[in-house]
Image: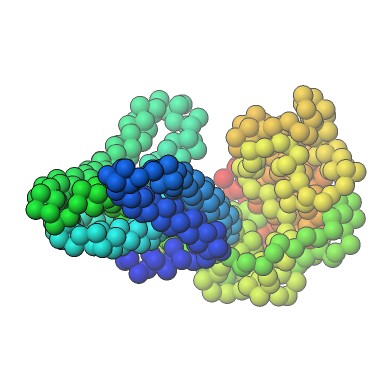
Amino acid sequence: MTEPSPVPFRSTGRVLLAHMRPHRRRIALGGLLGLAGAAAVLLQPLAAKELIEDLSRHDRVAGTLALLSGLVLLGAALKALSQYVLAYAAESVVLRARHRLIGRLLRLKMPVFEGMEPGDLLARVTSDTTLLRQVTTQSVVSAANGILTIVGVLVMMGLLDPVLLCVSVGVTVLVSVVVTTAMPRISRATVRAQASVGAMGATLERALGALRTVKASGAEERETAAVRRAADEAWRHGIQAARWQALMGTSAGLSVQLSFLSVLGAGGARVASGAIDVSTLVAFLLFLFYLTEPVSQLIQATTQFQVGAAAVARLREVDLLETEDDAPAVRRGTTTTAPTRPPATVVFEKVVFRYRPDLPDVHRGVDFTVPGKGMTAVVGPSGAGKSTLFALLERFHEPTSGRVLLDGRDILDIPLPELRADIGYIEQDAPVLSGSLRDNLLLAAPDVTDEELHDVLVRTRLDAFVRSLPRGLDTHVGHRGARLSGGERQRVAIARALLRGPRLLLLDEATSHLDAVNEQALRDVILEVARQTTVLVIAHRLSTVTTADRIVVMESGRVRTTGTHEELLVRDALYRRLAATQLLV
């Protein structure tokens, strides 16, 4: 894997401005409040100077003391209000970024998604967007306020005594060399640290996603060691960044302390010579003291910007990933008993497909037709390209050459939401999402009526199962449906597809985990559906094939032959061999 590199300042700035633009008014308000608070602070040394002069003249000090106290309280109040407004804006920036990222990740093209680690994508939505909070408000606004405050302080110090100002600036310039040296190192270390956090998330997700297999294989220690190695790598890069950040922070404090000592010595000499009075020296020292905060702000803002730039780079990578169409989903009216939409016809025309240019072809000129209505079964040895047919129909992938037609239209010309609204897809492993049983059933058809839902539950033999649950349809099924058996997950997947009221139903042997009684019942349901719509099934059991209206036999990425069960038994040796082994391949 190539080592990540720091993001150019200009590129980072453009992305940050894009994130900040929707919240610019609130950010500007927070910045103005901060500047007003800084102005109140800047007036305090002048009020203190006036107080000292009043004391030396034995004048009344109540008014000056009240003014100084008021400036202190006003500065604190404005600063607190500024921090709240900016924090509100920062959280809004993060929320908007997360909304956009989540929507984009769920629309990624399947080849793009399959080339990435889910754990790393999760880290971008969680930890990287959190870092965005720092840089969009705290860093940018703190830097702007810090610079303006420093300029204001330096102007006031110059008005009080230009000689002492030169002494202060001379010491500060020496320390700036350290800051300039540390900045690029912080950037590099932070980019590596963020990449390591993503790698750690990917490694952990890999183990948790197959935890049963890990436990059954006795591999807990090995997987734990792998995750710990990734965590150690993130720790090392984090320590490198922290080392340089500490050096920058210490340099800021050291510059002010050295300036304070230098001014104290030089100012004392000037007071002794009569060049300035004591009140001027006190005011100057107070200004120097107040300079500590904006200098620290500026150093911290610079550090945060380097940290945020690493997050911006990773978020920008997601922005550049290729996504599917952005059109809104099409919602059909669902009718689970008598669809009004005609069943679909499917045609594969000389389809060639490979997953990547450097990989061999999966399909080598696939040609066959699926007429409207009825059930068509696809059989063949493992690796023949059966499941890839469904991936092409759903446009998870697109043909390398050739065409896939739905009702005579090239599916590449059909808007994705419209295409997928016509198709019900049941995967072989029947994935179930974390949440309630109702959430899973209504995933593809949220607007169905209770009567339609009950009808499908009865047809898929889920009604008795639902009655046995403590909270019925509102019972939580656990992570990836862990509280359901394999057969229950398959029935849920079938019910979910039927509720969609599809014109084309794709089944990757959806009855493979069911017992004989429920398998026969669901096969009857599928045959009933096939009288009203088009059913295309990848068959792994002979019992499924014998009830099919037509059978497509595939071998080595090509269609070998088509026909009925009886016809193929007579004329095709491969089919006879598959049938003899119950098609379990």
Kindly give the residue lying farthest to the front in the view shown. Answer: 58
Q: 360 or 235, which lies in front?
A: 235
Q: Is residue 220 something that shows in the picture?
A: yes
The residue under the point 87% across, 54% down is 335
Query: Could you say which quadrant of the image residue 468 lies in?
Result: top right
The residue under the point 88% across, 43% down is 450
The residue under the point 64% across, 48% down is 427
Q: Position of residue 280 (x, y in %)?
A: 23, 52
Q: Position of residue 291 (x, y in %)?
A: 28, 51
Q: Position of residue 11 (x, y in %)?
A: 37, 68
Is residue 567 positioned above or below 285 on the image?
below
Task: Tell me: 458 left or right of 556.
Answer: right
Q: Position of residue 179 (x, y in %)?
A: 21, 55
Query: Could you say which quadrant of the image residue 563 lies in?
Result: bottom right
Q: 464 or 128, which lies in front?
A: 128
The N terminus is located in which quarter? bottom left
Task: Tell me: 497 left or right of 341.
Answer: left
Task: Tell me: 526 left or right of 237.
Answer: right
The C terminus is located in which quarter? top right
The residue under the point 33% across, 50% down is 50
Report the label total: 0
